[in-house]
Image (cartoon, grey):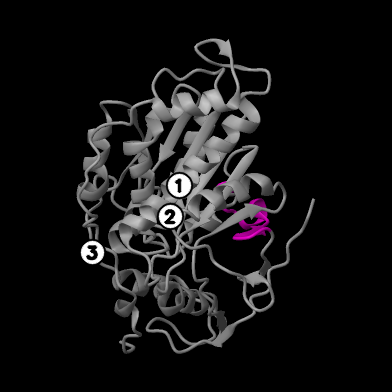
Amino acid sequence: SQVIVVSFVQRMPALEYPVGVLGQPWGADERNAWLARQSVKRSYSTEVLQKLEALKEHFDVQSYGSLPHDAERYPLFAVKSRNWDPNKPCVLVTGGVHGYETSGVQGALLFLQTEAKKYCENFNFLVAPCVSPWGYETIQRWNPEAVDPNRSFRTDGTAQEAIALMKFIESMKVDQWMCHIDLHETTDSDKLEFRPARAARDGQLTYDDHIPDGFYLVANSENPQLEWQSAMIQKVSQVTHIAPGDDKGQILGAPVEPEGVISFPAKSLGLCMSLTNAKYATTTEVYPDSPNANDDLCNSAQVATVVGALDYIVQQELTKGADVVDGKRTSAAKVMKSIKKRPASSGVSKKPSTVLRRPAAAYKRPAKA
């Protein structure tokens, strides 16, 4: 298999972080000091759980545990299509693995509200819209133990958010997943707060400082499926701009090939997109801090990714000798026409998003306590 060596091309010298000593990895005391600095800034109950209640008219909303940090406040839920059919291809959509990445959560919910029902005739869906609810409320990348959930989808991973989801997916007993789309963002706060925090936690003296300007996808280098990735990029380009490569033709030190797509070794990094054996898997990266972006556009870009992914699979997989509409063999064009005619789920609000997104200015380095 292809091995991608990632070498970040823009390194900044680490500054003294409010927690710990420069160049020394954190121990338990420093992690506790970091946790004490965190606070709730928005409501998981209002912005996620209430929306899940409204979806119960059309989908099954299933509990798969809770976070031990506060089990009552942070129950974990997934949304499952009804009449699950083992003969249909299975699709997994995950959001909020990094809780601070707002459109990962709200985009997954928007897909359920507006598009998912159109595709239920052809697919089984499982959507975990907010994998890290503590991170969502505190607008944090890490979990309460200062562990990145999106490096914990591995047998030795320690993030409870990842462990709970891995156990739940295993309990589904799906022999072969067709598709997994993991919804993320790259934000300016990455370079203002989260990358400096990681450098401090790990005792590093430099950190990467590059933020791509636009949307891009991260493929699994062990199974990139680049034609599928390009189909999603084409769909998203109708909503928002695609991140260009730098002067070396790279994004985050990885070659851009094709447009808007880079590849990382998902399994060895413990990325969420390696959670299943899906034939098609990707990680989205929306850029919400662009002057040309807003919350609604970012949510729509996430939905466009999922729609583009499913449309490609309909055309390339479901019509190759399969009976997919009303038990009759049909062309891809007829299947797509049938999907477009199906009604969307009801209950989606037409009001602009009022979800709090922590502004990058909030991450100006505070004085050391």
Residue 121's x, y, as percent?
46, 21
Q: Position of residue 122 (x, y in %)?
A: 50, 23
Report the amino acid beneath label 2.
Answer: Val
Q: Secondary structure at mark 3?
A: loop
Residue highlighted by disc 3:
41
Expressed as whole percent of the image width and height from the top left, the position of residue 65 reads 36, 38
Location of mark 1 (residue): 304
Residue 220 drawn above or below residue 295: above
Q: Which residues are magenta?
A: 258-273
Q: Residue 80: in sight, yes or no?
A: no
Gap between marks 1 and 2 measured at Cα: 8 Å
- In the image, farthest residue toward the top: 327
Residue 60: quadrant of the picture: top left
Callout 3 touching callout 1 (CB < 8 Å) = no
Q: Is residue 111 placed above or below 209 in the rendered structure?
A: above
Q: CA distance from mark 3 to mark 2?
A: 29 Å
Q: Are marks 1 and 2 in contact (CB under 8 Å)?
A: yes
